[in-house]
Amino acid sequence: MDLQRIISGIIVVLGLLVILLMPNTLVTAILFAIIAIIAMNEYLGAISKVCNPIKWVTYLSCIIVVTINYIPQQYINLVLMGTVPTILLILFAQVIATDMKTTFKDIAYTFLGICYIPGFMMFLSLINGMENGKFLLIYAFIAAWGTDTFAYCIGKRLGKHKFSKVSPKKSIEGCVAGTVSAVILTLLYTLILNKNLSFEYSYCIIGISALVLSLIGQIGDFAASCIKRYVDVKDYSNLLPGHGGMLDRIDSVLFIAPFAYILFTMI
C-alpha cells in the first residue's frame, strides 16, 4: 500500500507540474474544471447512498471554474453574489417541478457539493490569473500536500494521541508535524523564489500564511472525512491507489483555495 501511495503521489505531482507549466491561463482553468467534474462525480456517487442529488446542476456549476477569470474585475463580486441565490432558485424550482419528489435533503446535499467543489475550486483559477499566479498556486499545494505527507509519515510512526473520532488514524503528533513541515517547505520555496527570481516576499508573512493555510487544510481534510463517515464510505473512489479518489487528494486544497486567494490579494 505504501508503494502504491508513493507511485500515485508521484503521478499526481507530475500532473500538477504539467498543469502549472501550461502557459495559457484558459487551458489551466479547463484542466481545473475537469478535476472539479471528476471530484464532483465522486461526491455524487458517495452522497447518492443517502439522497438523490440534482446532478445536472452540479456538473453545470463546474463551468464557473473556467469562466471566472473572464469576468471583468469590477463585476466579479456581483456575479458571485448573484450565483448563490440563482443556484438556490434553480434547486427549489426543481422541488416544485417534481411535485416534491425532489426533497429538501436532496437540494441541501446538492448545494453543499456545488459550494464545496466548484465553488472552492474557482479560487485556484483566480489565483492562477493573478500576477505570478502559477508561483502562488504552488504555495497552496505545498501547504496542503506538505501537511498531508508529513502528517501521514510522522503520525504513522510517532503518533500516539488520537486527534478526533472523525478520522481515527490521524494523531495530534502527525497534525503538528504536518503543519511545522509545511511552514518549513514554504519558507524554503520562498528562499528559492527570492534568490533566483528576484522576488521580495516577506519570510515572516509567508511563514504565518503557511501556518494558517496548513491548519485550514487539515480542517478541510476532516470535513471530507465527516462526509465519508456519514455516507459510510472509506474513499470517494479508487482512482488513485493508496490515496483514494480525486476528491480524497484535493480535499485540503479545496478548503485552502479561497483563504489563499484572500491572503495573496492582501500581501
Image (cartoon, grey):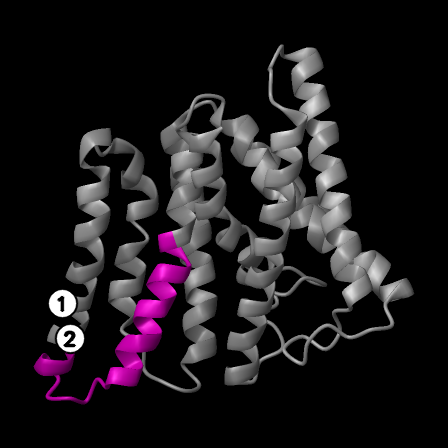
Which residue is at the front of the view, 212 or 93? Answer: 212
- Secondary structure beneath label 2: helix
Which of the 4 image quadrants contains residue 111?
bottom left
**Which region is colored magenta?**
94-119
Per the image, the residue denoted by label 2 is: 92
Figure check: 168 above or below 254? below
Q: Residue 131, how many percent across, how many down? A: 44, 21
Q: Residue 245, how many percent across, how many down? A: 58, 63
Figure check: 117 above or below 23? below
- The answer to whether one can see residue 54 in this image is yes
Say which amino acid is labelled 1.
Answer: Leu
Q: Residue 149, how many percent across, how many down? A: 75, 52
Identify the mark at residue 89; answer none if there is no mark. Answer: 1
| Residue 114 lies in the magenta stretch | yes
Say which amino acid is labelled 2.
Answer: Phe
Q: Is residue 154 left or right of residue 169?
A: right
Which residue is at the front of the view, 179 or 6? Answer: 179
At x 90%, y 64%, the residue is 158
Q: In which quarter of the image is the N terminus?
A: bottom right
* Dots 2, 1 in contact, CB < 8 A: yes
Q: Is residue 3 left or right of residue 85?
A: right
> Within 10 angstroms of label 1, few (less than 14), some, or many (20 or more) residues?
few
At x 67%, y 81%, the residue is 165
- Secondary structure beneath label 1: helix
Figure check: 147 above or below 174? above
Which of the 4 image quadrants contains residue 24?
top left
